[in-house]
Structures are given as C-alpha cells and as structure tokens.
Amino acid sequence: MAVTQRLAGVRIHLSGSNKELQADIADFVQKFAAKVFSEGGSIVHGSHPSFTEPLRKAAEDFIQAGGSKGALTLVRARSYSTDQYAAEIEEQRAFASVEIVPADNSDGPAADGLTPMRDWMADRSDAVICVGGAWWDVNKAKAGVPNELDTMLELGKPAFVVAGFGGAIAGYLKDDPSLLSRLRNGLSHEANATIANSASVEQVVGLIVEQLKNLPLARRNISRGRNFRILALDGGGLRGTFTAAVLAKWDDMLKAGGGNDLISHFDLVAGTSTGAILAIGLAMGLKPREILEFYEKKGPQIFPKDRKLRHWLKSKHDSATLRDLLTEVYGDKTLAADSRCRLVIPTVRAKQGQAEAIVTPHSPDRTAYRDISAVDAALASSAAPTYFDEAAFDGPVALETFLDGGVWANNPILPALAEAVRYLKIPLDRIDVLSIGTLSSESDFTDQLGKGKAGWAPHSVDLFFAAQEHGALVLAESFLGPTRHVRVNQQTPVEIKMDDAEAIQEMAQRGNEAGKEHFAEVRSRFFDGQHVDVWERF
C-alpha cells in the first residue's frame, strides 16, 4: 500500500535569515525542511547565505534517500545572479532548483531590488513560515521577513510566526501583538502564541508541520516544487525563423548535445501557424537547430518571390510545396503515437469560421484528433488566407477544411491556458508560461485614421496581428500575474513581412541575440533539470 504524504504538492515559503548565526535558528531550518521534505512538501527560500548551509544539509540527506532536488527552490534576484555569483549558483544547483527573478516589474524598476523576488515567492507558495531576520531595530523598511509576511497575508495565505529565537520577526510581533490573530492558519491566538514564543526547535517544528497537514493546501495534480509549464509559440510565417533561432540558441547553451532536451521541460506546448510547425517539430523529436535549418534552407522554397499576379488570382504561395517539405521532416508520424508532449494547435474550421484547437489525446474527452498526422495538423494551423489554400483532410465523419489558427489565436497563450485549466484540471496559480513571439514592429496607424478602405486595406493585417498579440498578452498577464509569464520577443524599426525570404538571416541573427539575452532567466525558470512526467494518452 502506498504511503500517504500529507504535504504532497504543497510549497512552503521559508522566510528568514540568521545574521548572528544562532545555532537554534540553523537547527530549526534544517529540521523543519527535513520534515517538510519527508511529508512530500517543498521549501521555497530567498537564498539568504545564512540559511543555505542548513537547507543544503536537509536537501542532500533527502536526495541521498531517493528524493528529488526539486524539493528545495532557492530564489535569487538578478542583482545576486551576475557572473561573480556563477560558481555559487552552480554549486546550489547540485541540491536545489535555482530561480532567478528579474529585478524590475511591470511598473518599472522596484524601489527595493528584492521586491520582485519576494512577490514571486509569495505568488508561488501556499504558506509562509517566518523565523529570524534582521534590521527591525535599525530600519524597519529594510526588514525583509516582516515584508514577506505581510505580502503573504495580503494574498490571504496562511502564516506561522517563529519568534522565540529572536530576530526581526520577534521585533515585529512585539510591536504588534495582534499579528497572531491575523495569521489565517486555522489556529487560535493561544496556539499561535505557543508556536511564536517557544524556544524548543522540536516543539515548533512538530506543531507547524502538523497544522500544515490539516490545511487544504495540497495540489496533487502538480509535480513537487514545479509549476505546470507551457511553451507558447506565436504565428508569423517566415518570422518563425526568429523563434527557431531563439530555441536553437538555448539548446546550444544548455549543451543538450545530440538530443532535443528542451521539450522535456514542458507539460504542454501550444503553437499557431508557423508556431504550430515549430511546436510539432519539437514534439516529433527534431532538434531546434534542425528546425532552424529548415527555415533557412526551405523558407525561400515555401515563400518564393514574384508571386504578385498569382496573389490576385489565387493563394499567393503553393500549399503543395509546404506539404511536401513538411512530409520530408515529419514523415508519417502522428500526434497521438509520436508526440513527446501534449500539444494545442489552434486552427479554424473553414466552412463555418469556427475557432478550433487540434490537441493530442491527453484527456478522455479530447480524442477527436487522435489519428491526425503531424503534417495535417501543421497545415491546418498554417493555412493563412490569401497566402495558402485551406487545408483539407478526412475528419471523423467527412472531409474537413481548415484555415490558419492565427485568425483567432496568433498568440496561443489563452487556448493553452484554457486547455490546462479545463481539461487537465491544473489550478491557474500553478501554471508558468514561456511565450515566444515572431518579431513585432513599432506600428503607428495614425496616417490611416479617417481614410476608409483605401487607407486601411494595406495595413489591416498589421493592425489585426498587433491588436491580437497585445490583447492576448494583457489577458494572460491578468490571469497569471507578472511572476508566472515570461515573454521573449523583439521589435524591429521596420516591419518584416511574413513571407520575406530575404530577411531570413537577419531574423536568425535577432533570434540568436534574444536567446542569449534571456537565457539566464529562462534557464532558471524553465530549464532547471526538472523534467516532466510522460504524458498519458487516451
């Protein structure tokens, strides 16, 4: 019979520091972490050097006993993640996941460079334990532990105060005794007072862990210490060269060597149009560098020049060419049998103009496209009106025709989120999204205002994609908040057309640069060595 782990899936934010290197605080940190690990939970901590050693001992003991290093997450602000800390970070990666959080936010640079890191931990954690801390008697605004406690309480999350060992949290409690009645942890004022004032490490650890087990915190459909991860790839024709170059650069920097290791870090991959070609390629086991070479070598064949007359009479480019070239790289593989990850591929049913998503059979009620080939799925999402003919293939009942998914979801973040929440039952606050664009231009539609069809006709597509991309990002940010979404893209001073084969090398270079620029943050948050479980097929 399997042993029940009462804290399975629960993340505990351990807030504190041990400036005076007190033995009892270090003992508490090590024993508390060990107890949480043994019950299936994980610890999130802001990488204070005074806590690193006791956390390391607890994590190493747990790993030696067969546990995962994902049980401990050490979070660092970007200012403490520069080259001078590189060796220290690599040492920590041996026993913990290391997350690097940018030192700015959507509102601009933070007054305190640690604020985004603290917000990130609060957003990701189910409860907070406060112990030790410094600065309360010198500069209350600089006292991090009380700040982290208040942030968690503002989010309505339970907290425990361990003040018997002194530090900033003891000063905060002394100045505001009512704090014990605001902890939202299900205990009475008296019970919280016992925890707060006790100087017995064993007693405090036992009382806190026991109450954590009683709280409705567990997220059993989420891997320990890691959010459900989504990779979302925008549409954009040949501008997918930029995306492919970003992925190839990351793969090179990770030294994946011969295999496609990127995809193993994502629970679900969504791609629209050219993003679908990329997503399916990754899922079929192609290396990012191979996909980039496909764009560089085959792009001019897919999007040849001098098709202006054809554009007025029929689709600008030949769909048969695209099918033949995709068949060369995908072969006869299918989404159900060969995909290494769950997929969401937005498309449109051409006859009714209905938004649709082709998905892998990852849920009992998501099996309609179980037998679709990789080639057909890619074509169904990339049949951009006027650029390519509609895609047609036999459906479950009759011949079906499809148009480019970019008509409704050029940025596929929202259908990916809907799939995860609705069909995979993932809590929204347990989802991370890495989204990659296909370059955007510094659009200005002032000259088109008030000029009717003549003014708007040449620019309607630009307006459509700009507004759609922005709208999807705004809504995703509303759902996820600023700490659970990373966006990688570049703006160009002059728009690069979707079928501009002459700009392929420029786009590849831009992707290479963007990959290098974002590597540290993306590696920390998505390529941390915690691979996803094999997805279940239905």
Image: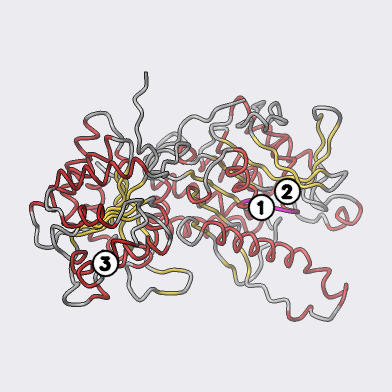
Few, some or many residues within 10 Å of mark 2 (<14, 14–19, 20+): many
Residue linked to disc 2: 405
User: Residue 299 at what x, y percent from top left?
Assistant: 66, 48
420 or 173: nearer the viewer: 173
CA distance for labels 1 and 2:
8 Å
At label 1, the amino acid type is: Gly
User: Residue 42 at what x, y percent from top left?
Assistant: 32, 43
Residue linked to disc 1: 235
Residue 364 can be seen, yes or no: yes
Residue linked to disc 3: 144
502 or 1: nearer the viewer: 1
Query: Which quadrant is the C terminus positioned in?
Result: top right
Tell me if 30 is positioned left or right of 406 in this view: left
The first of marks 1 and 2 along the sequence is 1
Answer with the quarter of the image where residue 138 lies: bottom left
Seen from this angle, which residue lies furthest top? 1
Query: Which SS type dominates the magenta stretch?
Result: loop
Q: Determine the secondary structure under disc 3.
A: helix
At label 2, the amino acid type is: Gly
137 or 93: nearer the viewer: 137
Tell me if 41 is positioned left or right of 21 in this view: right
Marks 1, 2: nearer the viewer: 2
At label 3, the amino acid type is: Gly
Q: Give the range drawn in magenta.
A: 408-412
Q: Determine the secondary structure under disc 1.
A: loop
User: Residue 383 at what x, y percent from top left?
Assistant: 77, 46
The first of marks 1 and 3 along the sequence is 3
